[in-house]
Amino acid sequence: PAAAPAGYGTLPLPTNAFGAGYTVSAHRGAAATRLYSSASANVETSKRSAMITEEEKRALLDKTDVFVFDCDGVIWKGDSLIEGVPETLEMLKAMGKKMFFVTNNSTKSRAGYLKKFLSLGLKVEADEIYSSSYAAAAYLESIDFPKDKKVYVIGEVGIQEELDLVGIQHIGGPADAGKVVELTPGLALDHDKDVAAVVVGFDRYFNYHKIQTAQLCINENPGCMFIATNTDAVTHLTDAQEWAGNGSMVGCIKGCTNREPTVVGKPSGFMLDNIANKFGIDKSKICMVGDRLDTDILFGQHNGTNTMLVFTGVTTPETLAKSPVNPDNLIPGIADLLTLKR
């Protein structure tokens, strides 16, 4: 495999989950945008700022067999479907294009996301959905996480459901919501000595009890791993505004452990490699479509795919102009591909 970007270490993965010779990048830097500072070396002197033309759209479809879509900010915002998405997906399907949906949001399992797709009227198959909750469980399974050890979960039911599917014991999660630490003289919070990994995913019920439990497990249990589903700064919980993302929770655990996590969600290539290996897809025939430069676009660029940035999510033309990341294509939203149907 290609060498990891500067500032990363590599952890060998067995072949059972992600294919022969795959390696996991373990985050050694400060933030995704800085981790991938090497991206600046790939930016052309004349940065793309113009939206994709009709001719370029046709050329893109001709050379693309598979579209990989981010979800939040591309397909929906919160629980609201972005206009024109169903028609666009139907058009691409009619053209014979394969589609996958990859999300850094770990609050749901793949089964949970399938319900969301169907509730929004989108016809999607379960094996077309890849969530970071799945990536966390698949990573642990791939390194033969001991069956007699446990995972402490900061996060919601999505991570737990995926861990259940691979037979890994876990504690924490929603069960620790609402727990309050009363700081009385001599208080020492107990923690489970059998915890061998802490997985941090987005958690609306994040609290001090969870922070303290995580730091005790990581700092005091020999060899305990620190795994993050993603380090997104903000996310779309509703269609009204941006909300603090999992990066804020991961940052708390980094701060009290002085440890960097192994990040299994975008921009790490776990899920993309799994798609390519499982379905026998040439990555050069894939177009990654997303609204985030430091996750979605780098996810594609560092893993050998074409990329397309949409402006229906967190990135604006102003933030694009200030970023070292240079997407291959720019489009207002995926519904703008519908002009090819006319």
Image (spheres, grey):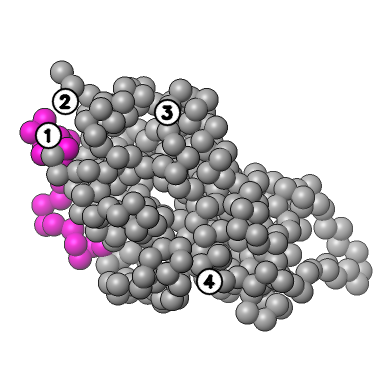
Q: Which residue corresponds to the image point at 91% horizontal and 72% vertical from the top-left? A: 186
Secondary structure beneath dot 1 equals helix
Q: Disc 2 marks which residue?
A: 340
Q: Disc 1 marks which residue?
A: 58
Comparing marks 1 and 3, which lies closer to the viewer?
A: 3
Secondary structure beneath dot 3 equals loop
Residue 293: x %, y % from top left: 32, 50
Three-letter code, disc 4: Ile
Q: Earlier in the sequence, mark 3 or mark 4?
A: 3
**Residue sitting farthest toward the bottom:** 222
User: As displayed, is residue 107 above or below residue 11?
Assistant: above
Give the extent of the magenta segment. 39-61
Judging depth in this view, the residue of 66 and 212 nearest the camera is: 66
Mark pair 2, 3: CA separation: 21 Å
| Residue 150 in magenta stretch | no
Q: Disc 4 marks which residue?
A: 143
Q: Is residue 125 left or right of residue 315?
A: right
Mark pair 2, 1: CA separation: 7 Å
Q: Which residue corresponds to the image point at 67% horizontal and 76% vertical from the top-left? A: 219
Q: Disc 3 marks which residue?
A: 123
